[in-house]
Image: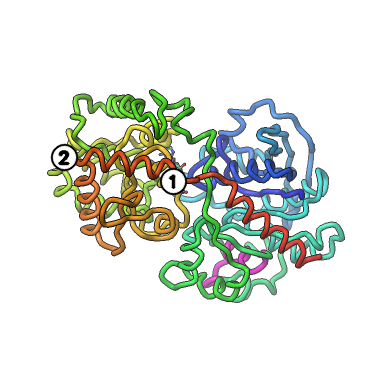
Amino acid sequence: MHIVFAASECSPWAKSGGMADVVSSLPRALAKHGHRVSVFFPYYRQVAKAEPKAPVVVPSITIPFPTYSRFVRILNGGIAGGVQTYFIDCNELFDREAFYGTPSGEYADNAERFGLLCRAVIEASKILGVPDLFHVHDWQAAMLPVMLRSVYYFDPVLRNVPAVLTIHNAGYQGWFPPQTIEKLLLPWDMYTVDKLEHYDKVDFLKGGIVYADAITTVSRKYAEEIQTSEFGNGLDGVLRKRSGDLLGITNGIDSEEWNPATDSHIAAHYTAENLAGKKECRRDLLHAYGLEGVSDDTAVIGVVSRFTTQKGFDFIVEIMDRLAQEDMVLVILGSGEEYYERLLVEMAERYPAKVRVQVKFDIVMAHKIEAGADIFLMPSRYEPGGLNQLYSLKYGTVPVVRATGGLDDTIDEQPDGEGNGFKFWGYNAWELFDAIQRALETFRNKEQWAKMMRRGMAEDFSWDKPAAEYLRLYERVIQNRS
Ligand code: ADP
């Protein structure tokens, strides 16, 4: 089978969150099964810096707009792990400081940027090899199925090619003014509430949901949740309509990138059988945060996250005065909304011996936290899949999570400490505090804690099962279209 992935991010070149990890590791797992997989994403400034000499494979593809055209080059990003990577090069749109926008706002031409991405992937595929299926990710690539089923409707080579859409986060939908329909040369009859319109806006993700052959989310629970008004962000109705084609598949993790036995970013290696190296990682992490001298009996709580409301930072801030009285230190790594950056930095200033924050996107530090912390905190309001709790389990760092989406699917708390972590249900900061207290209490029982760490580390995080589920789905949608 030949599968083309279209996305706005792919690790390690361009990453702002978990989607980049999935777009990089799922193709490798599919390639292992003998399938041909090509991954397309934009040649952002950051990618160009890492790959300045990527060879040109297609020198010019015309992408039409109403009164002008843009011209895109396809660059060869090489083959790794059996997966072919291509970069979509369009200087004027992608050679920018950030992927989507700056702290002062999203780029005003994002509809054009990601509309172009979708059309460019379709056109490039016609030159480099029409796939058996397109697999597109989140709103940035969601217009690909919309285009396939509209402006490319009469194309004989694309007519029967299905598209699968994976929703990594329904909280981001790509809302643009109605004129976007014209801008992207789409027919106006698509601008209706059962298709692309969402409260007087064009909604890219909604378009993908309506026109994809199947839709997946990154956990089973989230597939259920987004069909409710609480989590659907206004798309629950359209998702319920497509519930027969909606499937939740829990992510695997890339065990080359995330493995405490081989991780090149951490101070020492360790395994479930020999945990000695984790102590060294803990020392190294505390040193990196200027917290030398913390006793072995004090729990190190880690957070690695985008700073957004979704991730539950308001809960952490709310309980901080009380949490600071506990025998713990809190180390936070993240970047994002200035509001949370400021709140968290203030919190660190108030409790310098207890709380430290590093405001940046730093992949090496993310690995150091996963390896060096004792407890990992993820009190998300909602969490489509969540990779960090899986990395934490694999690194013997016990997660404390809110029971939502992928967190609820993967973390299991048992009253006698027999589970793999701690979780709370209510939308309430004090339930988080109670869960942390349960974790701290268990932490004090060294034997029970080591058992819990090992239980998490022993779980199967490989992509084998999820990749097989994706393949079954691909086969089904291909068959339905032929
Ligand atoms: P989301 O995709 O919602 O951001 P996930 O838990 O699925 O959440 O994935 C987050 C990914 O992004 C993880 O690989 C995590 O290590 C990484 N990450 C998030 N923030 C940072 C940061 N500040 N520095 C480095 N990596 C980060």
Quadrant position of residue 280: top left
Could you tell me which secondary element the residue under label 2 belongs to? loop
Name the residue furthest right. 156
Task: Indicate the position of residue 433 as horizontal and vertical percent values.
Answer: 21, 53
Some atom of ligand 1 lies within 8 Å of the CB belonging to the residue at label 1: no
Task: Indicate the position of residue 218 as horizontal and vertical percent values.
Answer: 52, 56
In the picture shown, does residue 235 fall above or below 58?
A: below
Queried whether the magenta region covers residue 228, the answer comes back as: no
Q: Toward the viewer: 317 or 285?
A: 285
In the picture shown, does residue 170 fall above or below 324?
A: below
Name the residue furthest left. 325
In the picture shown, does residue 98 fall above or below 166?
A: above
Mark 2 nearby-residue class (10 Å; few <14, some 14–19, many ≥20): few
Q: Is residue 332 left or right of residue 56?
A: left
State the residue at coordinates (30%, 27%): 279
Q: How many marks?
A: 2
Some atom of ligand 1 lies within 8 Å of the CB belonging to the residue at label 2: no
Mark 1 nearby-residue class (10 Å; few <14, some 14–19, many ≥20): many
Marks 1 and 2, the one that precedes in the sequence: 2
Say the numbered circle drawn on residue 327.
Answer: 2
Label 1 sits on residue: 390
Q: Toward the viewer: 109 or 339?
A: 339
Looking at the rendered structure, the kind of residue marked 1 is Leu
Could you tell me which secondary element the residue under label 1 belongs to? helix
Looking at the rendered structure, the kind of residue marked 2 is Asp
Could one spot residue 262 in this view of the protein? yes
Q: Which residues are magenta?
A: 198-212
State the residue at coordinates (74%, 29%): 55
Queried whether the magenta region covers residue 201, the answer comes back as: yes
Gap in Å between the C-alphas at discs 1 and 2?
25 Å
* Ligand 1 quadrant in view: top left
